[in-house]
Amino acid sequence: MATRACARWRSLSLRIAAPATGSASACPWSSDGAVPTRLARPLRRGEPEGPPEPDPRAQTGNRRIVWSECLNYWKHDSAIIDEGAQLGEGTKVWHFAHVSPGARIGARCALGQGVYVGNDVLIGDGVRVQNNVSVYDAVTLEDEVFCGPSMVFTNVYNPRAAVARKNEYRRTLVRRGATLGANCTIVCGVTIGAHAFVGAGAVVQKDVPDYALVVGVPARRIGWMSRFGERLAFGADGRATCPQTGDVYELQDQRCVLVQEGRLP
């Protein structure tokens, strides 16, 4: 029995250490991209029978993290990625997430625990979708969008259980760098502007301008945010500078416009 157990662990170690040709996966818990040594080699002669001690960096709760062979992305072993879904290099899919067949997801994204991604969904690069968020059909997230935990998208404006309205989906667009706070709701058919900031618990029923800070039910604009996420204080000249980056913004026709780029830290 001990010999068979040792053989199984040796097989697992060899399989993880030598992924199929063309795999470009990098290890999420290692700064140099290397697979932890204890998982990356076969058992040496003289080592005790049975499984090796797991590397603590290769654990999620009581479950072992396993790399998906032949793929450029990483998924937890409880996640479901349907055949036909497209995921970019370096993307991570965590516990109990479900990605539908038609979904297209960019590089370096993170899908948290319990996330659902529908068929007609496009997600750009560097997007963060926190736990328990459902990205339904007809939603597009541009690069570097942040979706806070348990925030809500919709795609039918007037749903009824007894009325089929799959042909009435209204498209929602979230532009680059926008933040959608925890537990906010985005009513379908709106556009969230670039680097806009939707406060926690807000209900968005109409378009949100670039850099706008909106809060409340229904959501209303109470200020402006820099692309770094700092609230902007405009002077009498109608200009504001982000204290973190040096970006200069200007109010033009009740819109906030970036007129001089600084440098992101």
Image: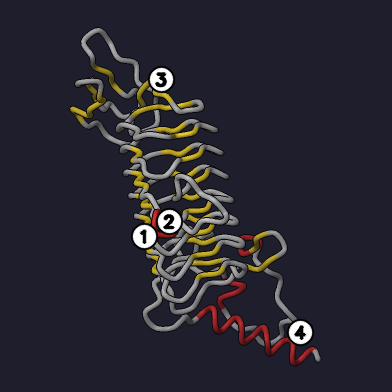
In-front residue for pair 223/40: 223
Give the residue type at disc 1.
Gly
In-front residue for pair 197/11: 197
Give the residue type at disc 4.
Glu
Q: Quadrant of residue 234?
A: top left
* Residue 133: x %, y % from top left: 54, 50
Categorize mark 3 by other alpha carbons within 10 Å: few (<14), some (14-19), many (20+): few
Q: Residue at x 38, y 21 (%)?
A: 223
Residue named by callout 3: 222
Secondary structure, mark 4, is loop
Query: Which quadrant is home to the N terminus?
Result: bottom right
Residue named by callout 4: 49
Q: Earlier in the sequence, mark 3 or mark 2?
A: 2
Residue named by callout 2: 109
> Marks 1 and 4: which is nearer the front?
1
Secondary structure, mark 1, is loop
* Residue 90: x %, y % from top left: 42, 62
Residue named by callout 1: 106
Secondary structure, mark 3, is strand
The residues bearing labels 1 and 4 have C-alpha atoms spaced at a distance of 42 Å
